[in-house]
Image: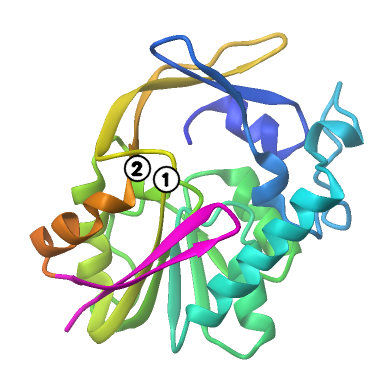
Amino acid sequence: MLGHLYERALGGERCWIRHEDGELRPLPTHRWLGAGAAERGCASAEGSSSGDVGTGDEDAASDEDFDEAVAQMCSGPTIELGCGPGRLVARLVQRGIPALGIDRSVTAIRLAGRGGAPAILGDVFEPLPGMGRWQTVLLVDGNVGLGGDPLRILGRAAELLSRGGRCVVEFDAQTIGVCSRWVRLESARDVGPWFRWASVGVDSAAMLAAQVGLTLIGVRMLGGRVIANLAAL
């Protein structure tokens, strides 16, 4: 995500994501903030309320199950690209797994630090620590569509992995193929800039993986969400 509205959304302001065809969806900030949002002070933005970042008990339980399942897929040193507030990185660190997040958002990195997640501010395509030595690379919450170019971000994941490592990738359960389009963030009082993003269906996983030197070795459905494991064999 890009722009000032992403920063404000992480602070608690209710935002939506609009696609170029007019489709408008709530930004799932509650999911990114995780169960510890209140403790990390994430609902303090001007004009926000606890309902802006909250979610129903059933959805929260589903998100918790998803996070737990993803964490169990990670082994060895793990890096998350586009970590946001770092809920998964923090979960891994609590289990004794060396983990690091990277994100372009100042607010996300600040919240990650508060939540116990080591994270660095930067672009995922810039030089990163441990190139070629990570055992697991995480790409969840739609980040396989970063910049509208899934091949580029998966290629970066492949560069980061050690031989035998795995990229744990969330694909869009509702998408067939790759749909790259312009999107922007909106709030009740502001509109952000347009930027490219892609929705990527799991039917494309094997083809995309092969193009960057990875191999699809498994797919798992998790409460309506879908995760694929791509191995650097």
Disc 2 from disc 1: Cα separation: 9 Å
Comparing 118 with 85, the one in front is 85
Q: Is residue 219 magenta?
A: yes
**x and y percent of residue 175 in the render?**
36, 38
Comparing 200 with 186, the one in front is 200
The image quarter containing residue 26 is top right
Residue assigned mark 2: 145
Q: Magenta stretch: give its range.
A: 214-233
Q: Main secondary structure of the magenta part?
A: strand
Which residue is rendered at x = 43% and y = 62% of the image?
Answer: 227
Q: Mark number for residue 172? A: 1
The residue under label 2 is which amino acid type? Gly
Colouring style: rainbow
Dot 1 lies on which element? loop
Give yes or no for contact between labels 2 and 1 (Cβ–Cβ under 8 Å).
yes
- Report the side of 201 relative to 170 (left or right): left
Which residue is rendered at x = 82% and y = 55% of the image?
Answer: 40
The residue under label 1 is which amino acid type? Asp
The image quarter containing residue 193 is top left
Q: Is residue 58 visible?
A: yes
Dot 2 lies on which element? helix
Q: Is residue 42 above or below residue 129?
A: above
Comparing 47 with 72, the one in front is 72
| Disc 1 crowd, CA 10 A, few/some/many (<14, 14-19, 20+) | many
Q: Is residue 91 above or below residue 12?
A: below
- Report the side of 199 relative to 35 (left or right): left
**x and y percent of residue 184 in the render?**
47, 20
Q: Is residue 139 visible?
A: no
**x and y percent of residue 27 in the render?**
62, 32
Give whichever of discs 2 and 1 has the lower sequence position: 2
Q: Is residue 68 above or below residue 29?
A: below
